[in-house]
Image (cartoon, rainbow, N blue to C red):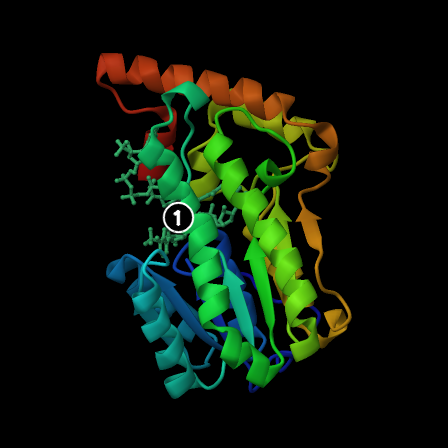
Amino acid sequence: MNTTFALSSHLFAGKTAFITGGSSGINLAIAGAYAAHGARVAICGRTQARLDVAATQLRTYGGEVRAYQADVRDPQQLAQALQATRDELGTIDVLVCGAAGNFLAAAEDLSVNGFRTVVDIDLMGSFHAASLAFEQLRDSKGCILFITAAMASQPHAYQLHVGAAKAGIDNMMRNLALEWGCHGIRANSIMPGPIEDTEGLRRLSAGSALGKLADSIPLGRLGHVQDIAAAAVFLASPMAQYITGVVLAVDGGQCLAGSAHFNAGARAFLDEQARSKERGTPTVAARAAAH
Ligand code: HXC
Ligand code: NAP
């Protein structure tokens, strides 16, 4: 992980960060960036093996790290992880709500449980984390970062469930910024664009469609996890002490170009998945994920 920015490596010295879904991808990069800047870091997720690998990686920065198995849909598990963090690493200063689930599904094919599952992980999971961490954040005058997506503000085909969940998160973020500002708690969202080499993107696009998506982005490339980590460092730092209630797009300008490229690529991807299923062969995405 290259998490070196031109900022003091002690920027978050004495601070504690808790990142839901922190064992992989964008959230792990955020955890790494906080650790690289001196924070004590706790992550949670459902898979112990992935948590262990991530914790080992995070410890290379030299600070204290904890990894707790907790499903964000289960408030009891999350409450235990948040309390253990306070006991073992100190009161939480920065909460990142990044755990999420996603898949492509046409609206008419989306089952009630499919819709509910994504809303439960993304929206309910973010609410559980924020509400259960309230006392710690009030005590530390800390901040919350929600990880949202372009689907929250602009319809993307086959992402009905994700759009509903992420829109709910952004609205909740603004409500919390309004209500908890008096406690010194800031709340903001980061809206990543398509980020290369992530599980999220592997589930949505592949092959030439991915190239076309990159070409449609004003800055001409997919994002890197470090682009998001840099924004997360800024928003949690004293440099952002007067910023609350905002959604920061970190997307190379993708939201300016609309969702048409995404929609066409996602259609092609769904069609390829259907054909692969008929043939009994793995999809491009599955092959890419295996490497
Ligand atoms: C249609 C699907 C489906 C698919 C699952 N479901 N996959 N429906 N198409 N491809 C349905 C199931 O049939 C079931 O409904 C319901 O969803 C729950 O499925 P489970 O597998 O039982 O759920 P669970 O084990 O809890 O797993 C949750 C999950 C899974 C979201 C389905 O994919 C997961 O664990 N994801 C975590 C990792 C992940 O998604 N990372 C990417 C985040 S990126 P029925 O009716 O059959 O019971 C992201 C990107 C945003 O969010 C934007 C990027 C640009
Ligand atoms: P990822 O690697 O799959 O990250 C999601 C993490 O959430 C995983 O570590 C996963 O670990 C955890 N998780 C899932 N369900 C959970 C649950 N119920 N309880 C606790 N943890 C859970 O995907 P990513 O692509 O990096 O995405 C990270 C964040 O960025 C998400 O919020 C996503 O919506 C957002 N985002 C991504 C992109 C992109 O291009 N990748 C674009 C816009 C927004 P376990 O499965 O082990 O639990």
* Residue at the extreme right of the image, as rendered: 242
Q: Is residue 36 above or below residue 122?
A: below
In the rendered structure, the answer to whether residue 7 lies left or right of residue 148 reads: right
Q: How far from the left and from the top, in percent, is residue 52?
A: 29, 66
Question: Which residue is nearer to you in this view: 95 or 180?
Answer: 180
Label 1, ligand 2: CB separation under 8 Å: yes
* Residue 78 quadrant: bottom left
Q: Is residue 91 above or below residue 147?
A: below
How dense is the environment of label 1, judged by Cα within 10 Å: few (below 14), some, or many (20 and up)?
A: many
Q: Residue at x 52, y 63 (%)?
A: 96
Can you see residue 103?
yes
Measured along the vertical axis of the image, is residue 268 above or below residue 53?
above
Pinpoint residue 233: horizontal percent, then vertical percent: 63, 66
Is 73 in front, or is 157? 73
Foreground residue among 96 and 196: 96
Whole-percent x, y for residue 196 in the image: 53, 41
- Disc tally is 1
Which x, y percent locates residue 166?
54, 44
Which residue: 68% across, 52% down? 247
**Quarter of the C terminus within the rendering:** top left
Residue 177: name its quadrant: bottom right
Q: Is residue 16 visible?
A: no
Outermost residue toward the front?
A: 179
Label 1 secondary element: helix
Amino acid carrying mark 1 in the image: Asp
- Which residue, given by chain and number where applicable, does mark 1 sit on? 120
